[in-house]
Image (cartoon, rainbow, N blue to C red):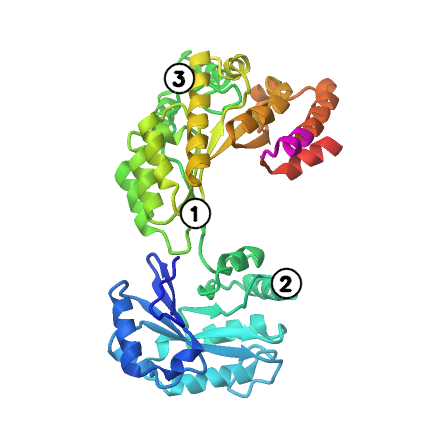
Amino acid sequence: MYAINLFKNDPIRISIHKNEFTFIRLPSSFHSITDEEVELQINKLAEMSEEIYISVNDTLKGLEPDVLFDAKKAKWVGFTVTLNEKSSDSTGSSIFSNIDADAIKKFSIILDQVKYKGSVIPEITFLSDYTLGPTIWEFFQRFNLPFIFLRMPGEPKGQDVKRVKEAFEYLRIRGFKKKIYFNFDNPYWDEWNKKTLNTFSGITTVHIDLSNKCTHSCVFCGLWGPDFIEESKKNSGTNKLDDNLKNFMNRQMPHEKAIEILESLPFTVKEVQFGGAGDPLTHPNWLDIISSWRNRGMQIEVLSNYEYPSMAELDFLHQLGKGGKKFRFIVNVSAASADVYKTVRPRQTKEVFDKVISNIRYSAMLRNRDGFGIEVVMLQIINLYNYKEAVKMIELAAELGVAVWLKPLEVHGPIHKKFIIPQAEYEEFKDLMSQVLVKAEELKVNLLFKEYIEKIAIA
């Protein structure tokens, strides 16, 4: 989403959303601008998108929706409709007794004045929450709308969040499947989605598995862990890996497919995480794929062991970090020393550990120098072999200038239970987590999901 100022004193708010429409909010002061001037600006916007949504203020005068539709300047025009209080249904039969019939009636009057009735969208505000859920349902049933907007002011807070959240739940339990968006000219529109659990606005985050391949051998891995591989060979009856498993381990998403997915996603998607069973950076086109998604304005998160990038590739990635949107690499190090690194990854060497740390150091240096770039988070999958290095991990993160995520081990099957911290050592583990909290505070290290460490420390 981005905004463009087309008027110096009172700018049009514009939000470009891929594969859906361009949202334009006309401020109320535009009632003093002639149709000719408005049309000139709309013409400029029409060059940017074939599907334009124009949000029209109630006070706007002299701008006829049919003129915009006839000239193909707008596909939809939105009008504000305010829900006031519970009222009886005076506009015709309804399955609900608690809809705001006055709001329905006002919108019907608006529709009577235009010929492109299916292109007029209500932007609902409310003073009373009692009628919100039923009235939204009634708007869709009665007018066959493609979507509506909820026009909410400012940040999501208090009772308003609770009221909208309850309205959405009311709709969900009745099988409602239509689209409801918060007004995109509000910079907090996505926070409204999250805090009200808006499942009607489309997905916002996707996870893409580019590659199942990996050259590392993390003992806790459910695919490439040495114990998992040996057990798979044993279960095959031939002391070899089954062909189906080998094919799975070598599977990678075609380059064209990754771009096709990007092109087909709805406009609501703003973030992608590249991860999965393998390391996405083992894909031969990983850099092109990540840059393609980044260049579409996506927030990016990549799960990797961070061994593979060259310095030139790190420089390229650093430049992709411009723009203020999240560009994060979560690096599974799971060790603060080469010896523990080799224990956790039996097939790796001190040289690999040194290269990973060098890559992290270089990326962090660029980010600290330029104020943009890759945000690196060092991930430690806490297990029997590395939990005693938790405090050292905080110290290493402080030295490198990066964040830390201490993540408890996920047990993928019986063979991985041996990597759980033994009960006899659990008190020591708890004490170490308390030390982690103190050390992170002292060294000002960003500790992701800190609340989980706090729960362990006081358990």
Q: Position of residue 70 (x, y in %)?
A: 25, 79
* Of labels 3 and 1, the one closer to you: 1
Residue 223 numbered tag: none
Q: Badge 2 is on which residue?
A: 162
The residue stretch that appears in magenta = 437-445
Mark 3 highlights which residue?
241
Q: Is residue 444 magenta?
A: yes
Please say if the residues under marks 1 and 2 sit with CB atoms less than 8 Å apart: no
Distance of label 3 from label 2 (alpha carbons): 53 Å
* Magenta span dominant secondary structure: helix
Residue 392 at what x, y percent from top left?
60, 21
Which numbered disc flags the more N-terminal residue, 3 or 1? 3
Q: Is residue 210 visible?
A: yes
Image location of residue 382, percent across then percent down: 60, 25
Give left or right: position of 129 versus 300.
Answer: right
Q: Which residue is mark 1?
A: 324
Instruction: Using the rendered view, name the quadrant where residue 164 is placed.
Output: bottom right
Closer to the eye: label 1 or 2: 1
Precedes in sequence: disc 1 or disc 2: 2
